[in-house]
Amino acid sequence: MVQVRREPLADKAAELLLARIRSGEWTLGAKLPGETTLAPQLGVGRSTVREAIRQLAGRGVLASRQGAGVFVTALDVPEDWDAVLRRADIVSVLEARIAIETEAAGLAAERRTPAELRALRRALADRAARRSGLEDHVDADTAFHRAIVVAAHNPILTELFDGFVPRSREAMISMLRLRGTFGSDADHDTHAGLLDAVAAGDARSAAERSRTHLAELKARLS
């Protein structure tokens, strides 16, 4: 005789219970109905309800108290710790980028050559053309920002930027995956404005635009 596995049903029952908690049907600290009530509501057996409750207890949403019942201890699943750590790492990367690229942008506005301006315009156009693939877009974005650092004519800043690229690339890809969107027209306009400030020789504006752009990325992760 083949035994029917209850895990998929339990997963579904757990999600249904979680959806009802999220909707406000049960408030924080509320006691859930008993298994005999929940089972027909969820369309599963009592043993599946028990498994669903165990799942949500393991995720910090419910707590079973012996002799008292099952109580709501959170109104949603606490955020995955790995995601928290990923965001913390991305914030550190963005802070380092602010330190390097803000100074580089200001220097680039003062020191860029006509050839470097042409390279920057090509890099911006390439970045705009590569919006369909996430990793492709990050690579084009990195090339644009590197062109600004190179135009600063400070070999130490370029060395810092280049040594930081593998870590920065990984963090930017993770950030955009968390956000789910990238390559918007507004984002392109932000980079075009940075290039305009560099081209105009406005060091203060170039540095401020670079800092503001990266600081806004950081703020969205909080």
Image: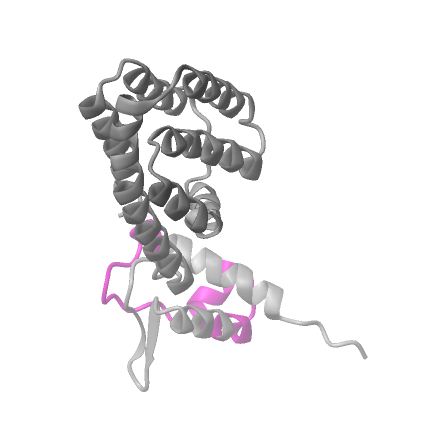
Task: Return the residue nearer the eye: 157 or 43.
Answer: 157
At horizontal 46% and vertical 39% (from top left) the residue drawn is 180
Depicted 71 relative to depicted 41: above or below: below
> Looking at the rendering, which quadrant does residue 192 occupy?
top left
Q: Is residue 26 magenta?
A: yes
Question: Furthest-right residue in view?
Answer: 1
The structure residue drawn at horizontal position 53% and vertical position 27%, both measured from the top left corner, is 131
Give the image location of residue 96, x and y in percent: 30, 48
Which residue does the image show at 52% across and 36% down from the upper left? 139
Residue sitting nearer the eye, 197 or 218? 197
Q: How is the image coloured?
A: one colour
Q: Position of residue 38 (x, y in %)?
A: 44, 65
**Which image quadrant is residue 80 in?**
bottom left
Of residues 133 and 193, the one nearer the viewer is: 193
> Which residue sits at x=25%, y=29%?
106
Residue 67 covered by magenta stretch:
no
Where 33 sits versus 132, above or below? Answer: below
Residue ranking furthest to the bottom? 66
Q: Nearer the viewer, residue 166 or 157?
A: 157
Q: With respect to residue 114, does 159 lie above or below?
A: below
Spot occupied by residue 40 in the image (x, y as percentages of width and height)? 51, 62
Tell me which segment is drawn in magenta.
21-50
Taking 61 as reference, is 172 left or right? right
**Residue 99 in the figure: left or right of residue 14:** left
- Residue 216 visible, this angle: no
Residue 15 in the image, given as x and y percentages of width and height: 47, 58
